Image (cartoon, coloured by chain):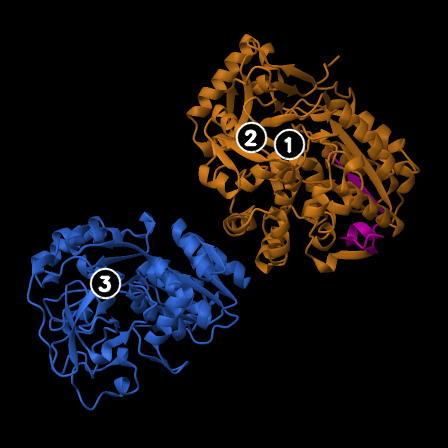
């Protein structure tokens, strides 16, 4: 029986705490009295994932018919799937998407369906490379579809292949992929790594256009999503739900498949990352030392490539299919079962170590904007109820924050960093003054459509992702970051955690309460 | 009187060039410039008077001369030895102050009738700069007969003098000459209202050009590449809409113009680029960021450069020089008058960052040569309390 999450009170006997620091780690001694929030241990994996998938397809939730009953010869079937941003790190083969899509294709073949198209639901993300597609889908699926032009990547800037389905009662444009909308059946294959993933967001965002996405990917929505991991309190969720219901009302027939993964995030060579420090075995200590020493001597680019080569031993803990809302309700329960940790009260200071990866730098560089997004967007929002840190408190995050960008993946990020952040870091001002020009820039659109670039507007969304935290926090300090880059982000730079805590005392006083978010493996703090 | 004298000595010039290559400004220590006691210059003729500098700026062309990097183009149009210094606010014998418009045109040279350019008030384009009763010298500060601002006294022709209003400080007044260069450069860009204009270089000329464009041109977007924090702050304050580091100019122009990119080249670009540096790399950058049929205005003094002009040909780019000042046809006014107003209205006296006595000329020139990195813009000699004996 895996153990639940745990909140450790640091005392004099507590060993140093491991903090992620990009493509590396720091061992930090937290002040006595600090709390460390650990993720629950990995849930048991499904014994027969393929059997569970088949069972889900045959026994759908909500008012959906079993998948075989929805399939018939001559129909147009579209299978959309989550892109390279999920899961993190990429999982060991076979990927869940491969398992699910193969099962769906088996049923489609049995039913005599021969008009089948696969679509990577990119939203405004970069296109996936062939190796990434092969990893997600498996060679059999890839080779059956890609050579025939039947494996597509959603293009949010292709007016010929978008259809406007109408406006929600809040005036939000709903414009999605034409092939998906006009198919007789759309099957969406999700990997639900965190509570925000899936549900109506899959289609309403993953297959939508900028015109549509901008209605919820904006500062106001983010500042009113507290947090966006908590569906009941998320304006982002509400907007996607309005859109999803309009999509359904427009006649789009959707069969949603969602799967959850356990917290088994790192392979055995990094087993110490899965454990609580005082439980490290001699082997774990040796492994930590070996990895740390090796990293000290490894050039940064090589270290990056080593880390991005990690394949997570994630295992499926659930799979459910059918009507979107019924499916998602059950999925969310499974996510909570794996990730929720009860935490009593907020702290004055929240510390966190940021790892090498976030959803938008798979096989890429964690540039400073993504550092901000990972810390203030994703990790800060890993709460239900209240943030782990009080309003006006201090967030301390550890990451090298290099002034470095992937020129192919993140071209508009460079301009955003060089020009927009040089002028202001205020999300509202940024949105009003700069978003449209980036979003409609023909060069960024060209790069998004024809290369492997994120959409021109994407860095704005990364900044908005942290808007709630920016509004909430009194100060943000980055430990061990490139000073210039950290300053450009509008944050303070500290060389050590001790220095950072000293700096924080100007905001929260000399004897602050401190909570450390020991993440990943991912946890969701249920703050009372 | 005390003065800094620049002599024509080939060994010293070679030494200056070598020293200047090691560190900009080092030519002042090992080169052809030295502090001397010398006689005050004689009055060359009627209309001339002796004036006494209060402040005299150090400009990029001075630094280039001191470090032995100036183009040989100038050899027949200067006369040695000379006392440098052409950014001058000085005092007349009656105690009133003047700034010197240093170009030595027909009137100053006693040539009559004046050439067409001088007759039109466009003295910067005078065709007689080596003739008349003065020895060669395109400007005061490069002519052996006139002296220059880096000495306790010089002579100037009445046609060169512009009265300084009482309210204008010496620091503001010494900025008039470089500002006039910038005004001339900005107006040489033509009608830039609503256009995307990029300025390369954020030293004195670059910053004054930004101020001039902001006042006289009203471009839609005014982009400048500024290396140092102080320069960035000043550029914004003077009217730049986008201030980036020099390495970011190309990206900033691309974004402003929504240009596409082929290889690392923009397919479009800025309507106008004003190069306030004049180096090989700045001119190459200007060519890289200007649009087809756009205009490059060269305000910074160039030298010999090796550059691929294929884009100039293929994209039909206009490359224009902008030297000195005169009368601005677009506004029908003397450049110096426009500059005087701009200095006052834009508060350009704030660009004067440091003042040195003449006997500290090595420090002064070193400071001027590394002004940006030391948080400075304009460095000037202060002759108000020194160097008179």
Q: Residue furthest bottom?
A: B113
Span of residues in magenta = A166-191
In the picture, measured across the screen, residue A207 lies left or right of residue B387, that is right
Relative depth, front residue between A110 and B327: B327
Query: Residue A390: x, y in percent?
Result: 66, 30
Chain B colour as displayed: blue
Residue at 47% across, 72% down: B192
Confirm whether circles 2 and 3 share one chain: no
Disc 1: which residue = A379
Q: Which of the numbered marks, if any, corresponds to residue B309? A: none
| Count of numbered circles in the view | 3
Chain where mark 2 sits: A
Which element carries disc 3, helix, strand or loop?
strand
Chain where mark 3 sits: B
Q: Is residue A238 visible?
A: yes
Confirm whether circles 1 and 2 share one chain: yes
* Mark 3 in CB contact with mark 1 (< 8 angstroms): no
**First-in-chain label (1 vs 2):** 1
Confirm whether circles 3 and 1 share one chain: no
* Vertical relation: A255 (above or below) A496: below
* Vertical relation: A125 (above or below) B138: above
* Mark 1 in CB contact with mark 2 (< 8 angstroms): yes
Disc 3: which residue = B56
Which element carries disc 1, helix, strand or loop?
helix
Disc 2: which residue = A397
* Vertical relation: B193 (above or below) A470: below
């Amino acid at each position: 029986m895996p153990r639940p999450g745990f909140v450790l009170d640091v005392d004099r006997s507590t060993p140093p705490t491991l903090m992620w620091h990009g493509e590396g780690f720091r061992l930090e001694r937290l002040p006595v009295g600090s709390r460390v929030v650990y993720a629950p241990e990995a849930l048991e994996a499904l014994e027969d994932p393929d059997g569970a998938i088949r069972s889900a397809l045959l026994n759908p939730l909500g008012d959906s018919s079993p998948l075989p009953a929805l399939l018939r010869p001559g129909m147009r079937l579209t299978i959309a799937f989550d892109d390279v941003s999920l899961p993190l790190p990429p999982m060991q083969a076979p990927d869940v998407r491969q398992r699910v899509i193969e099962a769906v294709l088996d049923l489609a073949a049995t039913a005599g369906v021969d008009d089948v198209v696969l679509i990577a639901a990119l939203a405004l993300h970069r296109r996936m490379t062939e190796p990434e597609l092969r990893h997600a889908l498996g060679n059999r699926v890839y080779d059956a579809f890609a050579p025939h032009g039947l494996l597509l990547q959603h293009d949010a800037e292709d007016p010929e292949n978008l259809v406007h389905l109408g406006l929600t009662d809040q005036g939000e444009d709903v414009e999605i992929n034409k092939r998906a909308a006009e198919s007789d059946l759309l099957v969406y294959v999700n990997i639900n790594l965190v509570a925000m993933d899936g549900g109506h967001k899959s289609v309403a965002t993953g297959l939508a256009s900028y015109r549509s996405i901008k209605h919820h990917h904006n500062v106001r929505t983010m500042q009113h999503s507290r947090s966006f991991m908590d569906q009941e309190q998320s304006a982002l969720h509400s907007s996607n739900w309005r859109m999803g219901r309009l999509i359904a009302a427009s006649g789009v027939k959707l069969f949603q498949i969602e799967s959850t993964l356990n917290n088994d995030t790192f392979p055995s060579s990094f087993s110490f990352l899965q454990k609580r420090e005082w439980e490290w075995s001699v082997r774990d200590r040796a492994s930590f030392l070996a990895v740390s020493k090796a990293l000290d001597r490894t050039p940064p680019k090589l270290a990056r490539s080593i880390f991005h080569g990690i394949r997570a031993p994630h295992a499926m803990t659930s799979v459910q299919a059918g009507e979107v809302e019924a499916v998602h309700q059950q999925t969310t329960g499974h996510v909570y079962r794996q990730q929720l940790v009860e935490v009593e009260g907020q702290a004055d200071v929240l510390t966190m170590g940021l790892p090498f990866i976030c959803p938008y730098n798979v096989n890429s560089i964690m540039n400073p904007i993504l550092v901000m997004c990972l810390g203030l967007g994703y990790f800060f929002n890993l709460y239900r109820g209240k943030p782990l840190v009080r309003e006006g408190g201090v967030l301390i995050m550890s990451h090298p924050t290099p002034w470095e960008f992937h020129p192919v993946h993140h071209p508009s990020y460079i301009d955003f960093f060089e020009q927009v952040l040089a002028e202001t870091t205020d999300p509202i001002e940024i949105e009003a003054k700069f978003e449209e020009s980036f979003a409609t820039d023909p060069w960024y659109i060209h790069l998004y459509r024809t290369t492997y670039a994120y959409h021109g507007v994407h860095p704005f969304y990364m900044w908005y992702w942290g808007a709630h935290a920016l509004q909430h926090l009194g100060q943000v300090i980055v430990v061990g970051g490139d000073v210039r880059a950290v300053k450009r982000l509008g944050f303070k730079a500290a060389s050590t955690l001790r220095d950072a805590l000293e700096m924080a005392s100007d905001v929260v006083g000399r004897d602050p309460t401190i909570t450390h978010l020991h993440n990943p493996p991912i946890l969701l703090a249920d703050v009372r | 009187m005390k003065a800094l004298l620049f002599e024509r000595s080939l060994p010293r010039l070679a030494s200056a060039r070598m020293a200047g290559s090691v560190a900009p400004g080092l030519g002042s220590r090992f080169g052809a410039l030295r502090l001397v006691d010398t006689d005050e210059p004689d009055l060359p003729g009627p209309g001339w008077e002796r004036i006494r500098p209060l402040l005299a700026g150090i400009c990029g062309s001075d630094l280039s001369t001191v470090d032995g990097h100036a183009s040989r183009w100038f050899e027949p149009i200067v006369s040695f030895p000379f006392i440098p210094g052409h950014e001058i606010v000085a005092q007349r014998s009656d105690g009133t102050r003047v700034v010197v418009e240093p170009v030595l045109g027909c009137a100053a040279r006693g040539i009559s009738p004046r050439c067409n350019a001088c007759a039109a008030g466009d003295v910067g384009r005078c065709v007689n700069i080596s003739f008349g009763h003065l020895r060669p010298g395109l400007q005061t500060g490069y002519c052996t007969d006139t002296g220059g601002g880096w000495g306790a006294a010089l002579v100037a022709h009445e046609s060169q003098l512009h009265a300084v209003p009482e309210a204008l400080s010496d620091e503001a007044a010494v900025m008039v000459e470089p500002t006039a260069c910038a005004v001339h450069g900005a107006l040489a860009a033509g009608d830039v209202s609503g256009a995307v204009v990029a300025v390369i270089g954020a030293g004195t000329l670059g910053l004054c050009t930004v101020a001039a464009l902001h006042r006289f041109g009203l471009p839609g977007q005014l982009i400048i590449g500024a290396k140092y924090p102080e320069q960035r702050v000043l550029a914004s304050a003077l009217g730049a809409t986008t201030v980036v580091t020099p390495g970011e100019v190309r990206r900033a122009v691309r974004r402003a113009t929504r240009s596409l990119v082929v290889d690392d080249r923009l397919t479009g670009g800025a309507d106008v680029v004003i190069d306030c540096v004049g180096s090989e790399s700045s001119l190459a950058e200007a060519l890289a960021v200007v649009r087809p049929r756009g205009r490059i205005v060269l305000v910074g003094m160039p030298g010999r450069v090796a550059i691929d002009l294929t884009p100039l040909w293929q994209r039909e780019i206009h490359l224009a020089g902008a030297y000195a000042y005169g009368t601005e046809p677009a506004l029908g006014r003397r450049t110096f008058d426009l500059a005087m107003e701009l200095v006052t209205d834009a508060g350009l006296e704030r660009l004067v960052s440091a003042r040195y006595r003449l006997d500290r000329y090595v420090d002064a020139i070193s400071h001027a040569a590394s002004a940006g990195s030391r948080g400075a813009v304009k460095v000037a000699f202060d002759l108000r309390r020194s160097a008179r004996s």
